[in-house]
Amino acid sequence: MTETIVIAEATASEPGRLDSRFSYAAFAFAFVFGHGAFAVSKGPDPLLDLPPWLPFVLLGIGVVPGVALAFIAGNRAQRGAGPDRIKAEKLLGTAWATGFVALALGVTGLTTTFDVPEAGDVLWPVGAVFVVGMINIAEGAVRRNTLHYNLGSWLTLVSAAALFLDTPGPFWVLALAGGGAYLLAALLEPRRLAALD
């Protein structure tokens, strides 16, 4: 009887069983349409003359549900988990706040110290994707989810590499390489979950 209870608790708290496909799909929308809108409307010779608020709205339409779904997944990861697992998930949650506070300090420091406020236009989105990628790597490691880990690795690398490009290049990289990675992750997530059964 005791063995059955222990096995049931281990199964209930299995970290790899979180279904992230809807979160991935929401972020794919944000990247493709939000960063994509910035890509086509920024730079010395923009392809389209979009209202300045439109890219932000498109980004928000994907990011808000994506973040909400990711937080729901984090809470689900704690259900039926032991104290070590709950502590790990809480530390991951705290990493989000730490990462974005550090990003705010870094971008503000760079743009004011070197008096290049326009650099923030690229540093904010690229830095945000870098932070998200690093936290996805940590979440993937803690939850033993290689798809999430690999997605984080890709986001971290492409966001850092995007800084080598002039505007609107970084936005194209985020839209195509970042959005494409999220879309691929959303498509691969059902296969990953099926392999756990």
Image: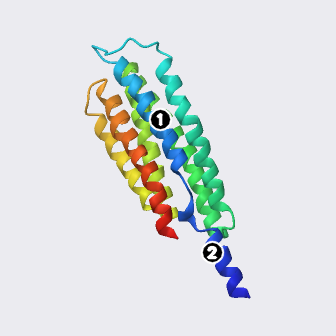
Q: Nearer the viewer, residue 60 or 167?
A: 60
Sequence-wise, which precedes: disc 1 or disc 2?
A: 2
- Name the quadrant of the N terminus: bottom right
For disc 2, the marked residue is: 10
> Residue 87's image quarter?
bottom right
Residue 143 vs 131, above or below: the answer is below
Residue toward you, 112 or 147 = 147
Q: Position of residue 171 (x, y in %)?
A: 35, 29
Label 2 sits on a secondary structure element that is helix
Residue 37 location (% of width, % of height): 41, 23
Quick one: label 1, few (<14), some, or many (20+) residues within 10 Å? many
Q: Is residue 109 visible?
A: no
In this orientation, does residue 95 appear?
yes
Q: Residue at x 54, y 46 (%)?
A: 22
Numbered badge on residue 29: 1
Q: Residue 122, how many percent across, how many down?
A: 38, 27
Q: Are marks 1 and 2 in contact (CB under 8 Å)?
A: no
Looking at the rendered structure, the kind of residue marked 2 is Ala
